[in-house]
């Protein structure tokens, strides 16, 4: 399984990175499979540095804030009007209401909206099977319905926090993960609003409590110094690393 950081800027695109998007690839012995975890604003452009977007097999949306889902509007245009013709409907998994929200985002009628290009399915309690991947969605703490995504394939596990405040559900989602991709949007010592995001030290603490084998800090907003966030994460998880746009990680 391979992870590519397509975009990792928190809350909005920054000068060096688009908003959240992570490409996960694995081969089932017959062909490569490619899924996206989030498709935030600016990320569709960055994605094209790594693959043809028409080769994406499925999209998983952690939640419906624009920095995690809004480039599905551009992906809709690409799939609907591409000179190669309309491709098959591909699965998009996410919170309830994703189809209507994204139709409104592109000012489409709710029916059919984007449902001819994307087959929308709400997250449920059962794991989702796509090619070699098993993906489990775990509700976490955020002002809107938001989910951590645990992706398993080839005997390895990747957990992506999505956006979340500190909560036990996040620890459960990341338990013994080979790689924990965790947001850290806040700084310790500031008057951070409750129930929204993690600080670096909280992300490190979550990784430690989950016994994750590797921690990548992501979703740092452009107004923060990424190295300062990393330093705070290392107070609770000494080997924490920063997710860098364009970087790849093999599991």
Image: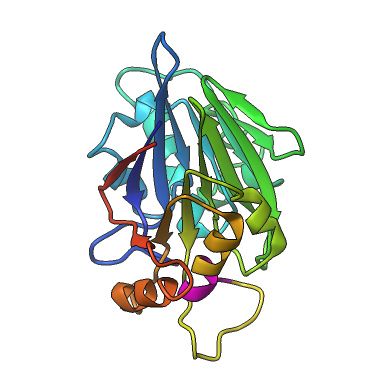
Most foreground residue, 50 or 214: 214
Q: Quadrant of the N terminus?
A: top left
> Residue 147 in the image: x percent, y percent?
64, 52
The colour style of the image is rainbow
**Residue name at image x 75 percent, y 38 percent:** 124
Q: Is residue 23 left or right of residue 247?
A: right
Identified at 48% across, 51% down, the residue is 180
- What residue range appears in magenta? 197-203
Toward the right, the furthest residue is 125
| Quarter of the figure that contains the C terminus | top left
Residue 165 in which image quadrant? bottom right
Residue 72 position, x and y percent, is: 47, 43
- Percent of width and height locating residue 19: 38, 57
| Image-quadrant location for residue 142 | bottom right
Q: Is residue 89 magenta?
A: no
Does residue 47 sit above or below 118 in this rendering?
Answer: below
View extreme (top): residue:
30
Residue 28 vs residue 64, the one in the foreground: 28
Task: Tell me what residue is drawn at x 48 percent, y 84 percent.
Answer: 188
Q: Is any atom of residue 146 visible in this view?
A: no
Left or right? Give the position of 60 relative to 168: left
Q: Is residue 39 visible?
A: yes
Please give the name of the residue rendered at 35% of the width and 76% of the height, measured from the top-left corner. Answer: 231
Q: 64 or 103: nearer the eye?
A: 64
Placement of 103 over or under 92, stated as above or below: below
Give the number of marks: 0
In the image, residue 65 sits, relative to residue 102, either above or below, namely: below
């Amino acid at each position: 399984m391979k992870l590519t950081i397509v975009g990792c800027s928190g809350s909005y695109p920054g000068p060096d990175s688009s908003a959240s998007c992570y490409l996960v690839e694995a081969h089932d012995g017959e062909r490569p499979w490619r899924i996206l975890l989030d498709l935030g604003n600016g990320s569709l452009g960055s994605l094209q540095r790594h693959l043809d977007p028409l080769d994406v097999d499925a999209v998983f949306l952690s939640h419906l804030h624009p920095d995690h889902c809004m480039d599905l509007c551009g992906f809709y245009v690409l799939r609907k009007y591409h000179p190669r013709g309309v491709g098959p409907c591909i699965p998009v998994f996410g919170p309830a209401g994703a189809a209507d929200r994204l139709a409104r985002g592109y000012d489409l009628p709710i029916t059919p909206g984007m449902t001819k290009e994307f087959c929308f399915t709400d997250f449920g309690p059962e794991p989702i099977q796509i090619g070699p991947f098993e993906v489990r969605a775990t509700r976490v703490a955020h002002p809107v319905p938001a989910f951590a995504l645990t992706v398993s394939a080839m005997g390895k596990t990747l957990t992506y926090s999505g956006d979340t405040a500190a909560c036990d559900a996040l620890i459960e989602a990341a338990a013994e993960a080979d790689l924990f991709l965790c947001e850290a949007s806040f700084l310790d010592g500031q008057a951070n609003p409750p129930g929204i995001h993690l600080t670096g030290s909280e992300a490190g603490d979550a990784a430690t409590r989950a016994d994750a084998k590797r921690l990548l800090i992501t979703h740092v907003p452009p107004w923060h110094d990424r190295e300062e966030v990393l330093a705070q994460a290392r107070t609770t998880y000494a080997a924490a690393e920063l997710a860098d746009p364009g970087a790849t990680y093999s599991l």
